[in-house]
Image (cartoon, coloured by chain):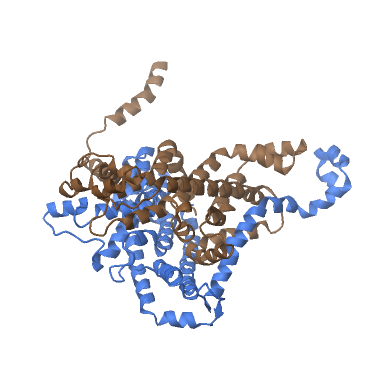
Chain colours: A brown, B blue
Amino acid sequence: MTTTASRAPLAQPASRRRRPFNPRRAAAWALLVLAIAVSVLPFLWVLRTALSTNNALATNAASLLPAEFSFGAFKRVFGLQSAAEAVAEGGSGAQIDFWLYLRNSIVFSSITTAGAVFFSAMAAYAFARLRWKGRNAVFSLFLGTMLVPPIFTALPNFLLIKNLDLLNTMLGMVLPYLFMTPFAIFFLRQFFLNMSREVEEAAMLDGAKHLRIFFQIVLPNAAAPIATLALLTFIGQWNEYFWPLLVGSQDDVRVLQVGLGVFKSQSPQGAPDWSGLMAATLISALPVLILFAAFGKKIVNSIGFSGIK
Amino acid sequence: MTTLAKHPSSVAPAEVKPRPKSGLRGLGDLKIALLFIAPAMIGFIVFYVVPTLRGVYLSFTEYNILGDPEWVGMENYTAIAKDPLFWNSLAVTGQYVFLNIVLQTALALGLALLMHQVAKSTIIRGALLLPYLMSNVIAALLWFWMLDYQIGVVNQFIEWSGLPRVAFFGSEAWAIPTQALINTWRHMGYTALLIFAGLQAIPGHVYEVAKLDGASAFQTFRKITIPLLRPVLVLVLVVTVIGSFQVFDTVAVTSGGGPVNATRVIQYYIYQRAFTESDFGYGSAIAVILFLILALVAFIQMKFLKGNESDLD
């Protein structure tokens, strides 16, 4: 009896593996593989282009391997090439400081992420765990701002930052994102609502105040959703283009996304510096690619949830 | 005394507590809540509420940043009504939104069904999500290169298959479809994952019953999958429409509104009027119109979603 019982669950996956060939399934797989190829292959093409030289690209437009393998494009992007060398390899010869833009992007994204996630967590705590009059009305008001298109507030916000004399400063770039995003509050409130009250109440009986409960119980218990939110916020901020374009157009605060546009427009119209442009693109994408490689599962699993926005 | 009766278990602590504390109970946690919400509230008021009101105010003014805004009433709006560039931007944006809805929803629905049937692995979902995690600027540049007329790889393939090369960014006919294709590439996987999540939520027994009743695959899809998926599909449509109306980055980086006015979408036109021509009143007025369009879309969304909430029960 015991042998049959233990064999039965084993038999099932075995028979599942030996499924007969099914043309519909095969076709479905083929289409899926095609979709994956369309999603992923462009990145390999970018890498291949970045490792080519511009001269060889023109004559060798479709080979999968780099045309005349060279690190020249990356050197050019990071300003490690002399102007003459750069021009010889199809660059514009103008200096562009991608290290600086990389640093600016890291500073901009990290500060806004830290601020928005922390302050939104505090607000979410007030909306989820504290009882006060008008709580739901204020929350709906906050949520309502999700409907306001960013371009609409961008114009007056630009004027405000200008009046404060903060154009082309990191502070001016960071401020509008620093205190909250409606989505972050919404996202964390969902999690805080579902936390059990028991631990919190036990702590209360011990005389713990809300600040201590927030820092020592709620935040640690919500570490996973907070990490996911921080990840999503960071990627979003890293990719932000419009606001940094308006406010941070000067070199010392310019972020990578804006720098990419500048790099592209520097290319002579007739013959763009394709390998340089693709090297720059890859560098700008790299942090997100690394985060994705490390936390892909977290990001993927958050999609069903974040779709509620 | 009545409170004591209500909470017999807390008799001892309640008696120990001093009286003023129970008097504060009426306010709930308001004081501490204000403390917790203060930073978010400041950001909310300064960077969302006030700019929204100021944006509406600016739309009734003439303002070139140097002087003070000058009240001109409806002048901006009447000028917009007669502005061919505005109507063109609206038409171009409409075209872009329409293409995005059709392409993105159809492809994403197909992909979601494929995943649901043959592969649910995280790796596959991750691969499909990769473009979505890239910025608009990166997606734009990557395709700007691959779609290049001279040496872009796509045109190489087009030539090999015996067709004439396509000036994707340079021809008026292709400019908007190209922008829509880039956006579709970036969002296809994300949208598919949203729909996939919706598919996962449909209970299996619904399908079993359909099978017992002898329903064909197509009938099941039409009579069960689509209706039960309707809330997700409506959500996807609305997110796509609202997002598409605000296209800017890809246009700004690749075609810059051209050729001629073929890709001068609404947001790009606002940007030009406000920031390159320093006409903030006019730019704000167009932004108000865009805002109203999006509010209308959101309103329709809420109506639809409410009507469909019971579908899954």
Residue B297 falls left or right of residue B118: right
Residue A188 in sight = yes
Residue A1 in sight = no
Looking at the picture, tell me which residue is in the foreground, A185 or A168: A168
Looking at the picture, tell me which residue is in the foreground, B207 or A87: A87
Counting from the top left corner in percent of width and height, residue B41 is at 64, 57
Up-down: is B75 above or below A206? Answer: below
Counting from the top left corner in percent of width and height, residue A211 is at 70, 43
* Furthest residue in direction left, as rendered: B162
Looking at the picture, tell me which residue is in the foreground, A152 or A135: A152
Counting from the top left corner in percent of width and height, residue B38 is at 67, 54
Up-down: is B12 above or below B269? Answer: above
Up-down: is B200 above or below A258? Answer: above
Figure quadrant of residue A294? top left
Up-down: is A221 above or below B66? Answer: above
Counting from the top left corner in percent of width and height, residue B213 is at 34, 48
- At horizontal 39% and vertical 59% (from top left) the residue drawn is B249
The number of discs equals: 0
Residue B142 falls left or right of residue B274: left
- At horizontal 73% and vertical 53% (from top left) the residue drawn is B30
Figure quadrant of residue A47? top left
